[in-house]
Amino acid sequence: MRFFRPVATACALACLSAGVMRAPAAGAQEQMAVGASDQDHALLERVEHHLDAISLLKARFRQTAPDGGQTTGTAWIDRTNRRMRFQYDPPSPLLLVANHDQVVFNDSQLDQTTTMPMDKTPLGLLLRPHLQLSGDVTVTGLSRDGNAVNITVVRTDSPGDGSLTLLFHDSPLLLRGWIIQDAQEQTTRVDLLDIHAGGAMPPDSLFNTDLPEH
């Protein structure tokens, strides 16, 4: 396995890449904040309520890298406790765990572990128990296409930390994945499949961030 390919894939997912993200134009942010229609505001409120209702989620996922390569696995998302686990299917050596305000990425084949603050990644927004789409979060894009709704957000004070596009089905509203875009406008997409919300809390060991370091 070539070194840069698995690292680039997981880094795009968790925004662990070395390059900074391109900040959206100030005019675009102002237009969204000032010019959003009543219908847009109502949709954003629906999205906030939907995300608030997601405390625990388990799903299969399909991740598409910037080069089109795909990997699959199982995801656990615990928004109440701000933690997540992405367990990639064999033969992938990748594992991503977010917990204790950290995002930890491990490549067992390369014997390499990388850690960075959760609040420096767009995934930190997704793991907020209450993601309010205003204030310290700015909506930079909102689109509808049939039954699909896409909402792009950045941190208001640090848009250079990255952008996160949340993907929803509408009628009824359902989170179905997200897209992260880097400074070179390359995107990594995660689609959630076979989603199970709620249920018994998985063991704490599943979110252990003490991954091997070599």
Image: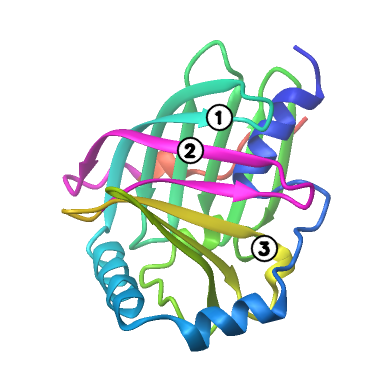
Total tally of numbered discs in the picture: 3
Is disc 1 in contact with disc 2, using a CB cutoff of under 8 Å? yes
Q: Is residue 212 visible?
A: no
Report the side of 18 relative to 150 (left or right): right
Up-down: is 199 above or below 113? below
**Residue named by callout 2:** 190
| Residues at marks 1 and 2, CA–CA distance in whole angstroms | 6 Å
Residue 106 sits above or below residue 119 on the image: above
Q: Callout 3: helix, strand or loop? A: helix
Membership of 188 in magenta stretch: yes
Q: Amino acid at mark 3?
A: Lys
Residue 11, numbered label: none
Q: In the picture, residue 163 is in which quadrant?
A: bottom right
Q: Name the N-terminal-most of marks 1 and 3.
A: 1
Q: Which residue is mark 1?
A: 64
What residue sits right under mark 3 in the picture?
A: 120
Q: Position of residue 11 (x, y in %)?
A: 69, 40
What is the span of residues highlighted in magenta in the rendered image?
A: 174-203
Residue 46 point in image, percent of width and height: 25, 70
Residue at point 51% right, 31% down? Answer: 63
Looking at the image, do the residues carrying marks 2 and 3 touch, with CB atoms under 8 Å apart? no
For discs 2 and 3, the disc positioned in front in the rendered view = 2
Q: Earlier in the sequence, mark 2 or mark 3?
A: 3
Could you tell me which quadrant the N terminus lies in?
top right
What is the C-alpha distance between the residues marked 1 and 3?
22 Å
Q: CA distance from mark 2 to mark 3?
A: 19 Å
Amino acid found under the numbered disc labelled 2: Val
Q: Residue at x 83, y 49 (%)?
A: 18
Q: Which residue is depicted at the point 80% across and 26% down?
A: 4
Q: Is residue 102 visible?
A: yes
Q: Report which quarter residue 116 is drawn in.
A: bottom right
